[in-house]
Image (cartoon, rainbow, N blue to C red):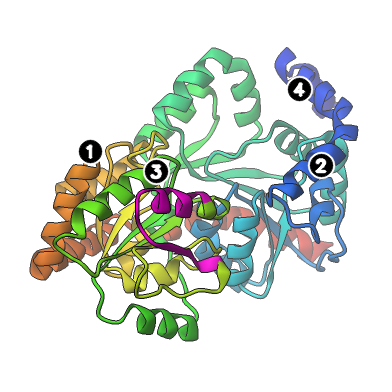
Amino acid sequence: MERAIERERLPVTLHAYRVLTRAAAPLVGALAARRLKRGKEDPERVLERRGQTSVVRPLGPLVWIHGASVGEIAAVVPLVERIASKDFNVLVTSGTVGSAHVAVQRLPSRAIHQFVPWDSPRFISRFLAHWAPDLGLFVESDLWPNLILMSSDRRIPLILVNGRLSERSFRRWRYALATIGAMLGRFDLCLAQSAADASRYRELGAPRIGTTGNLKLDVPEPPAEPRNLAALRSAIGDRTTFAAASTHPGEETALIETHRRLRHGFPRLLTIVAPRHPDRGGAIVEIAIGNGLSASLRSQSRLPREADDIFVVDTLGELGLVYRVAPIVFVGGSLASHGGQNPVEPIKLGAAIVHGPNVWNFAEIYSALDAAHGAEQVADAGRLAVRVAAWLRNPAERNAVAAAARETVASLGGALDRTLAALDPYLMQIRIEHSHA
């Protein structure tokens, strides 16, 4: 009866969303075909998007962790490891092929990865009936209405971890307070990255809020397969190397212009570009060739050739290689109006970081880095070329920047321990319930 009353109190927007997504379920075949053609789905696992799986639910308590994409899944790997070490089974869901690859690479053996179902009541019901999780942890801001509401209706405790809400998203949600309030109200606890995030969640209707810091500051170094690393280092030899990681459309043009400016002072310069979406690799090569540069793709089983100016790493899970061979890394999404990507992984591998002005997704981290002279902000290709050239010519200055960055990241860490402390009462309750079952 209580849950029925709660459902009646849902705002019209969420009622309409549920009706529309239920009616649209027959159309997912066409959607799946289109996404498969574009490489956006794994053809061997597409049924998971309908809530179907051949994986058996393990016996005992099961903690479910959901994150949208690569960054969120990489951020929760240490959390998954710690929860699994407490003798809990862990189900991790995400929505992209890249994140699935990260999950296979980095998650502990006790964890299971599945693609999150499309947000249709039919698929969500099938998913929840099979997995029957004891606790649901949603990472950052990937809030799907049916997934949240139907999990809550099954009395699965829900917790938002590493919660982040940009000022831009906050302003948008203020026009739909009833909708976001109804979803946030289903969470037992919201663990925000910062005091500013906590304040925004509170204003939007989250009932219980804590501030734990950013889990992305506690991520481990990304892995690199030793043979591949040795081969890449051998191919590069003593060439001057600069890298750009997680780049977005438009940024590669600036990077190619940067290379053109730098090559007069560094004639054997190699610029490595790892786009955020690897399927754009071919287009980047075309841009480079159109600008009179030689370029090749990692996906064609190639190592950089002596003649290559640009080497495009259009493969999944190989940023660990890139960060280990480049002393300077431009972190993408920051010249483009995307909000920036996470700089922590290259910092932990000793790179000096340069970035554009658009870093609101990681505003606290970049602000601290810039203030400590642990990173440098640039506005365009010209300033990027000047900064990279200065650091290439002055290894001592570059190393000082990298050291300041590592110290800054270390000082901002601790979110993992604070998050686990907040989760402990829920984990204890699950253990008690299963011991009496």
- Number of marks: 4
Tag 4–tag 3 contact (CB < 8 Å): no
Q: Are marks 4 and 2 in contact (CB under 8 Å)?
A: no
Q: CA distance from mark 4 to mark 2?
A: 14 Å
Q: Which of pointers 1 and 3 lies earlier in the amino acid sequence?
A: 3
Which circle marks residue 333 in the picture?
Answer: 3
Tell me which label, 2 or 3, sits earlier in the chain. 2
**Would residue 285 be counted in the magenta stretch?**
yes
Question: Which is in the foreground here, disc 1 or disc 2?
Answer: 1
Which one is closest to the eye, mark 2 or mark 3?
Answer: 3
* First of labels 4, 1 by sequence position: 4
Residue type at tag 1: Ala
Disc sitting over residue 17 in the figure: 4
Q: Are the two marked residues, 1 and 2, in contact with CB atoms closer than 8 angstroms?
A: no
Quadrant position of the N terminus in the picture? top right
On the rendered structure, is 36 left or right of 164? right
Name the residue that disc number 2 marks. 124
